[in-house]
Image (cartoon, rainbow, N blue to C red):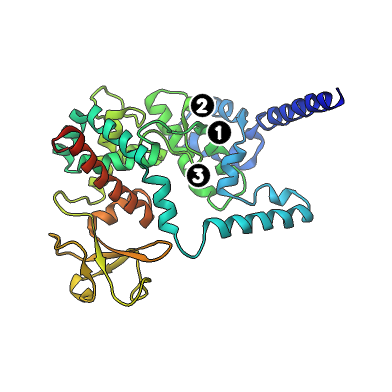
Amino acid sequence: MGKIIRNIFFFFFILTLTSLSLEAKDYTKKWAVKKFINTMVKKHRLDKVYLKKLFKSVVIQERALKIINPNYQIKQKSKKIIKKSSTIKKRKWSKYNAKYGSWTRYEEHLLTPEKIKLGVNYLYKHRKTFSEVYKKYGVPPEYIAGIIGVESRYGIKCGTYPIFDTLTTLAFEPNRRNRYFKYELENLLLLARKQKINPKNIKGSYAGAIGLGQFMPSSYAPFCVDGNNDGVRSMQNDADAIASVANYLKKNGWKKWEPVAERVIFKGGKRYVGRKTGYDTSYSQKSLKELKLKYGTWNYKGKVRLIKLNRYRYDELWFGADNFYVITRYNHDGHYAMVVHQLAQRLTRAYNKTYHYTLR
């Protein structure tokens, strides 16, 4: 009986802590928020009473803050706990950032058979939209689907964080990117006004990204388009999201008919150390005569990015064309662009095998 009572007490204790952590806070008392509100009123003519009402009740998104600023709660604990937390953090670092195999772990997480199956179904379901978008923007369906697959699992996981509360938390609680998140919060309020929606009702990622393509609020104005011609631009609508991702890539330099990446072979062991690698490198192909294409030739004469993929037992080396670099404008990471590329290739093969005709 004593054990049962203790368990009941523990349950209500945890419930109390949870409710306290979800308690709304009044952000209008913060000097930085007052300044932000005044700026929004003066710069964009937003209603001051309306803004105060929004900031009067904000649930601090601690989980999002911990991701952006891992030291957020550690600073509030004793030195003894700090030491323990540092040890745990060090162990996690060792586990997930081992010397070799970074690409293999990335690949295993994002290039799953399930994701390919879902992608094929998504391409078929929206084949008419993909066809129209390809004709208009010149971006292949498989690359658009690849990005949507990586970003939101084809709309299955668009995020459950309340975007207004999340961006408010990240904009005004200590972290190195306060300025950036204030900018995104500003754009969220402008977006909400334009679309006549309550910003409190928008859900998304821990960083404030919205919809199938995970656009940040600042990306809506320059890149989000009305794909289904209903008069509203929304990344939570499939047609709009598909067209918007294509528009994003097109505006960042996507070139129709040009390749994305091709694997090459290098000599001198299993690890490549010959030249600097990364999505931001640039080499003429003539200067890389020591590297040979693994599978014949490819129809591309421009400069290439040299991309190294670190596996457990060896390195893979790839040429990345201009279109590869364009994908990194969506997410500034070489592994991200390579996952999108390889997912796109696998989606193409699986789609052709399933439906016996090409995507375009």
Q: Which amino acid, mark 1?
A: Asp
Label 3 to label 1, Cα distance in Å? 11 Å
Quarter in which the C terminus is drawn: top left
Residue at which label 3 appears: 181
From this view, report whether residue 325 is shown above or below residue 144. Answer: below
| Observer-nearest of 327 and 356 | 356
Q: Earlier in the sequence, mark 2 or mark 1?
A: 1
Q: Residue at position x 43%, y 62% from top?
A: 312
Q: CA distance from mark 2 to mark 1?
A: 7 Å
Residue at the spot x=40%, y=61% of the render?
Answer: 311
Please give the residue where the numbered disc 2 appears in the rendered image: 200
The mark that comes first in sequence, 3 or 1, is: 1
- Looking at the rendering, in which quadrant would you find the N terminus? top right
Judge whether 29 appears above or below 285 on screen.
above
Left or right of 292 on screen, residue 72: right
In the picture provided, is 297 more to the left or to the right than 97?
A: left
The residue at 35%/75% (across/down) is: 269
Q: Is residue 225 visible in this depiction of the protein? A: no
Q: State how far apart marks 3 and 2 are (Cα).
A: 16 Å
Of all residues, the one furthest to the right in this rendering is: 2
What secondary structure is marked by label 2? Answer: helix
SS of the residue under disc 3: helix
